[in-house]
Image (cartoon, helix red, strand yellow):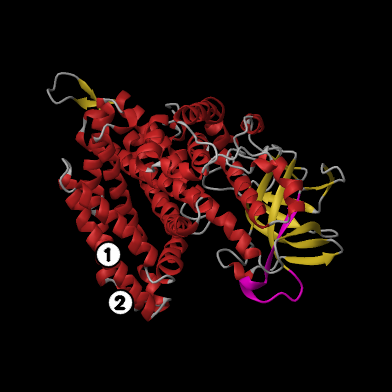
Amino acid sequence: MSEYQYPINDILFSLLCVAHIERLTPYLEDEVDSDLLDAILGEAGKLSEQVIAPINASGDKDGSRVEQGEVIEAKGFKEAFKAYSEGGWIGLSGDPKYGGQGLPSYIATAVNEGVQAANLSFSLCPLLSLGAIEAISLHASDELKNLYLPKMLAGEWAGTMNLTESAAGSDLAAISCKAMPDGDVFRIKGQKIFITWGDHQMSDNIIHLVLARLPNAPEGVKGISLFIVPKFILNEQGEPSERNDVQVVSVEHKMGIHASPTCVMSFGDKEGAVGYLVGRENEGIKAMFTMMNNARQGVGLQGLAISERAYQQALGYAKERKQGMNASRTERAAIIEHPDVLRMLMTMKSQIDAMRSLVYVAAVENDLSHLSTGEQQKQSIARTALYTPIVKGWITEQAQEITSLAIQVHGGMGFIEETGVAQHARDARILPIYEGTNGIQAIDLIGRKLHSDKGEAMTSLLAEIEGELVQWQESTFSSQVEKVRVVLVQAQKATQYCLLAMEKNPILGTGLAYSYMMLMGYLIGAWLQLRALDACHRGQGKLDETQKRSWEHSVAFYCDHLLSRSSSHFLSIEHGQSSVEELDENSFIR
């Protein structure tokens, strides 16, 4: 089984030449120069390759278990988390006031690509902590920030997100967990399910963010509040002391991410778990969406990361595995010499290149939404909101294909667990499901993001794409530009179709949502592929000739083989609305 290699050159190229991180320079107190960026990512690569990747397969085999009411994580994970924490990695983009390093979040994204590719199960713990940190930073009182953020940013305490209940999955309005006032605190009672890293021994405390209802709260999502519920209640010195009334009931047996404990958590089996209100009463959903939006881009990054890991393994195998004869029939050939294997590998690589570009473009836009001011900030907030469901939805859909192709490249050996490649497909399968299913991402795109502003943000994005295509129409890659232009026109038409459908009936109109999300994903991927190719031709990114040729092949293949998929999604939007609207439960017989 090939070892993971952190793709630092591809990441730097995407950041510098596609995402254009220099856009952030006017808003940063201290500029992040190339030497600092190289040094940070170089060390991140070592951590991912040497510390976190080696325990991926063993963690998948061993999983986690509950002993005497405590979750025991897989062997080696506690030591890896200690190395991760002591390296200061979780506080990279955190507020310096609380011990963070104050770096732009795109750097944390680049670091986390390596962590997630190295070990998806392990990476979920810091991912949830980062989401909790952001929610507390933006919504909690100064007192709670001072108590919890320094330890969380140092990695001494971990964080979780507690939304789901047995009767309340995607429908948060059905939450029944209760919060009763008790002096200066609240007593939380209820059960939560599917809680990622809900318990473990890797940190000194676990800070649960829990959605619950206060007495006489309004019905639906308007009556949900958010609470900090620590595993250990803090003493007067701010250190963990008394065990809170929080208990792990069990861990789920899952298809993948075996080493990430997915817990059933019980709050308040005795006197009630002590909780502290975050933000205002009945406004918890706002704070929780801070965590969810953070996590949704993080899950898109996971899709990229697991795809990269699977691709590296498939490429290594294809170079070593001999099967059949070479073209001249003189000797046995490595399977990478066979055109169909080359097709599969480039299907993987070209999509990964496009996915990575989108991840980092979205990350820089997210930084601009926080750092810039005035009209630029307004535009970046809208663009970040637009990118988020596409990053999460489109990229994780591609991860299903890419990890499956990795198995296919291995042939029969890919179906054998000992090669390790099947783990990537099993792990990747959760990505279109959690943090809002991809159907929900598509509905979010067509509803909250497209319909709510009458297409203003999307029209702005399409105009930017069109402007860059005009700049490239006389380039040496003009044939690819024209292919992208055809899809741009389809996207413009599809946008109008979707706006009309949503105006006519916001419920039935969402039947077009998935096709629209996928169409936009392929278009944006193609646009950013062309931007990368333009950078290659301009000599940007310090690429050698082999690397330039690789990008040229990637872009050409993407435009010829993958961009064409957008047409089927466009036709579904153009002609398929009525066949969806006419469906009901009687359309299906057994």
In the rendered image, the vertical position of residue 486 relative to residue 334, given as above or below = below
Give coordinates of residue 183: x percent, y percent: 87, 63
Residue 354 is left or right of residue 207, and the answer is left
| Cα–Cα span, label 2 and label 1 | 20 Å
* Label 1 element class: helix
Q: Secondary structure at mark 2?
A: helix
Magenta span includes 195? no
Quadrant where the C terminus is found in the figure: bottom left
Q: Measuring 17% from the left and 48% from the top, which residue is drawn there?
A: 473
Residue span colored magenta: 214-230
Q: Nearer the viewer, mark 2 or mark 1?
A: 1
Give me the disc on residue 492: 1
Q: Is residue 431 above or below residue 121?
A: below
Residue 578, numbered label: 2
Residue 237, position in %: x, y? 85, 42
- State yes or no: residue 227 in magenta: yes
Point out the image quarter for the N terminus. top left
Q: Is residue 412 left or right of residue 130?
A: left
Q: Quadrant of residue 71?
A: top right
Amino acid type, residue under disc 1 in the picture? Gln
Return the residue found at the far bottom. Answer: 504
- State the residue in front, 69 or 215: 215
Determine which quarter of the picture holds residue 200.
Answer: top right
Closer-to-camera residue (452/410): 452
Report the amino acid beneath label 2. Ser
**In the depicted view, which residue is nearer to us: 71 or 298?**
298
- Name the spot of residue 441 as percent of width and height, x first: 45, 61
